[in-house]
Each structure stands twice: as C-alpha cells, then as structure tokens.
Amino acid sequence: MPRDLYVLPASPGQEWMWLIHHMLRDASPYVIAGMVRIRGPVDPGALRRCLDLLVERHEALRTVFRMDPSGELSQVIQQAEPVDLALCDLDGTDTPYDRVQKDFRTFAARPFDLSRGPLLRASLTRLGPEDHVLGLAVHHIVSDGWSMRLMTSELAEAYPRLAAGHAPGLPEPPLQYADFAVWHREWLTSAAAREHLTYWCRQLDGASPLRLPADPAPPVAGPTPTAPVRLGPATTVALTETARRHGASLFMLLLTAYAATLARFSGQQDFVLTVPVAGRSREELSRTVGLFVNTLPIRVDASGNPTLLELLRRVRLTCLEAYDHQELPYERMVREAAWRRDRDDARLGPAMFALRVPLLAPRRLAGDTTVEVLEPPPAPGEMDLLTELTETPGQGLHGYLAGQAGTFRPDTVRLLADALTKVLTIAATGGGVPLDELPVTAGAARRRSVRGGTP
C-alpha cells in the first residue's frame, strides 16, 4: 500500500463527485477518458516513465478519498507509485482501430475504488509495428477536461526527452490541487461567497427546470444516440462577426441558438440551461491537474417571441453576470436557491452546452514519430441532452448533440441536431428572425408524429 503523505479536507466539488459516485456505483458516468494515436517507433519503457512523471508532478493523480466517522470526506495524498500500463497487441486483427475503441471504452468504464485507487488508468495498444494508441482514463473527482489536455501535452513534451535519456525539462506546477481546495473552502465562508450566493438565489428564484419531451418507449439499452453538428468556415466566421457586432462572444451566440432551439422544442419560455466553466481564474492553476471545472446555470428568458438577436442580448447579460459569480460551486447554488421543484425527478438543468477548447494538435515527437489526440466518444453523462462544439481554425465548428438512450430515439436526436444547425445558419445571416418562425419541430408535434408511426 502506498504511504499517506497528507490528509486534507476534500473540495466541495470532490464531495459532490464522491456522493454521485456512491449513488450510481458502477454506473457512474464521471470518468475523463482520452486516446492518443502514436505513429512511428514507440518505446513503452519511456511511456511508462512519462506516466510515472505525471503522477509524481501532480498530487491529484495519487489522491484517494476517505470518509471519517463524523461524515467528513478527506483527500489523502499518497506517495507516488509506478503506473500500470496495460499492453495489448491487435496487429494482424480485422478492423483493429474499431476494436481498440471498443476495448478502451470497456477499459475506461471499469469501476474505480475511490478509497484505494489508483484513479489513473493507462493502456497501450499496438495496431502495427509503428502504430499505437495510448489510452488514459481518470476519475473526474481528481481531473477534468483541462487536466486531460494538460496531461497529454506534458506527455508529448516529456516523451522525446526521456526516450533519448535526458531529463524531462518540465517546469514544476506552481500550485497543487490541494492548495486550491484549502483556499476554496476558506473562501466559501467569506463575505464575497455570501454575495455570490445571494446573487444565485435571486437569479434562480422560481426558475423552472427545462422539460424536454421524451419519446414514447425509447430504447433504454444500446449506444448513446448522437448526431453530428457541423458548420463550415464561412458560416463560423459569419457567426463570430455577428456576435462581435453585438458585443457578444461566439460562445454566447452559440448558446443563444441552442436556447432558441430548445425553447421551440419544449414550448417553454423560462427555463435553465447549464454550461461548464474551467474554474481556473488564477494563472498559476493553468498547469495543475485537478477538479476545477464548475457548472453555471443560465436562466433563459424567451418570453415575448423575441428575435434571435434580442434573445442574444438577454443571454449575453445573463452570462456576464454568471461569470462574475462563478466561484460558487454548482451544488451550493442548487441546494440553496429556491427554484421550483414541480416534479420529483426534476433537475435544474438537464441540458448542457459546451464550446470545447481544441484538443492537442498533431505534433512530431522525435524523428518520424507523431502524436495525435483522438476525439473522445460522445456521452451525455447525467444530462438528458449534451451539445459540444469545437472551433478548429480554418475548418469551422464541429461537434455533436447527444441524448440519453432511455429518453430519446436516435431520430429525435438527429432532428434536434439538424434544427440547431439551421438556427445557427440563420444566426449567421443576421439573426433577425422571431423564435416562432424558426424551423424547429415542437416536441408535442414530434410525439404525435412518433405515435402515428413515423420511424
């Protein structure tokens, strides 16, 4: 057993993740997973040393969790132990890349023991003599999407130096996650935190959860129903310019189009969407692995049949205020705010929108060896709907809309993705169209269509 080095209180985000993990048990969706394709000669020993280096550098990757008799959850930072790199050889098999994706999903989905660890899991699959896939899976309680990008970036920086027998040459992280956790817990007792809470209680007072019309008898098992969302470079430039002209960011305009689509689909005028924020407001946290990401509830006011541009004005103001109060943990906002709980199963924000930072661009490691981070498979987690888009320079916007398998049929997800694409195209041409003229099939009409026998 690794030796305990430090025992510190868990952060509020970790307490929330721990609770969900134990509620859902083996079905917990909170795993951050990614795959890196390496083309060229690979030294598994150097890769192992790189992984060991990550665990040494970032305390979060060697942290486990224990609940004391009083009900206090602690994060226990342990001494670094070698990472177990699982090896698999698929060279010579049919469709090896499809097989590695399937095998990695199974590998990443294996339950984690938060009290014992390790909470980082790695695999290396050989597809050919000079074609390998490195898979990383980390429990969300010690990581987030930013952390995964940081880890893959550090691996790409350190590998060629370690493979050549040199020191890795990486600067030490300015702070560790536990430093942030201690500061954040202290901040939550401050006057500033109370002001943040007052804002969210006022903002969410009487808010109704978004009610997405579920399909009759959708399949509960099977793959996640997803549909692509793609916008070309010209449309993306036009969207960016439209947003700029109205003092908004591209994200705000994309979120507005998503809100307009769901307002038409659900028939609601007042509802809440959720958006993730990095939670790294201090520069020194940019090179630290840990659970910093937070979720912000964005209340949408679509009353009065506004045009897309008027809705953008409302969404922009709401987002700016939310950003000013983003330090308060989401679970604290929801627990304290007096939002309307009209249904036993109602959640405040069952639909999320994210504009993701592009993954690590393909790069050369050493000699003829190149590395490329592969897109993670779509997964809505605990959301009914999740839409994620990424802007790639020169290629426009691409991403997906994913729904829960037990809530939506694949054709409904495709319909929503197609409607969102059309609304975004309208926004790119100026956005002066009222919501009731947008080409979105309302959910009630959709349900009647399904009952009537539409496949």
Image (cartoon, rainbow, N blue to C red):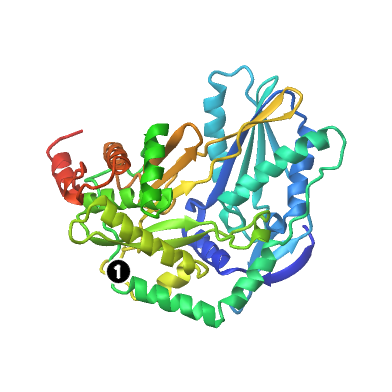
| Identity of the residue drawn at 26% across and 57% down | 211
Residue positioned most to the front = 245
Q: Is residue 455 above or below residue 337?
A: above
Most foreground residue, 244 or 45:
244
Residue 223 seen in the figure: no
Horizontally, residue 66 falls left or right of residue 444, namely right
x and y, in percent, of residue 409 in the image? 28, 40
- Residue 86: name its quadrant: top right
| Identity of the residue drawn at 32% across and 74% down | 205
Residue 328 seen in the figure: yes
User: How many numbered marks does the figure carry?
Assistant: 1
Quarter holding the N terminus? bottom right
Horizontally, residue 206 falls left or right of residue 12, namely left
Q: Is residue 320 above or below residue 287?
A: below
Quarter holding the C terminus? top left
| Identity of the residue drawn at 52% across and 65% down | 16
Most foreground residue, 141 or 439:
439
The residue to which callout 1 is attached is 207
Label 1, residues with CA under 10 Å away: few <14, some 14-19, many ≥20:
some
Horizontally, residue 378 falls left or right of residue 188, namely left
- Residue type at tag 1: Ala
> Helix, strand or loop at disc 1?
loop
| Identity of the residue drawn at 49% across and 32% down | 394
Most foreground residue, 436 or 120:
436
x and y, in percent, of residue 206 in the image? 28, 73
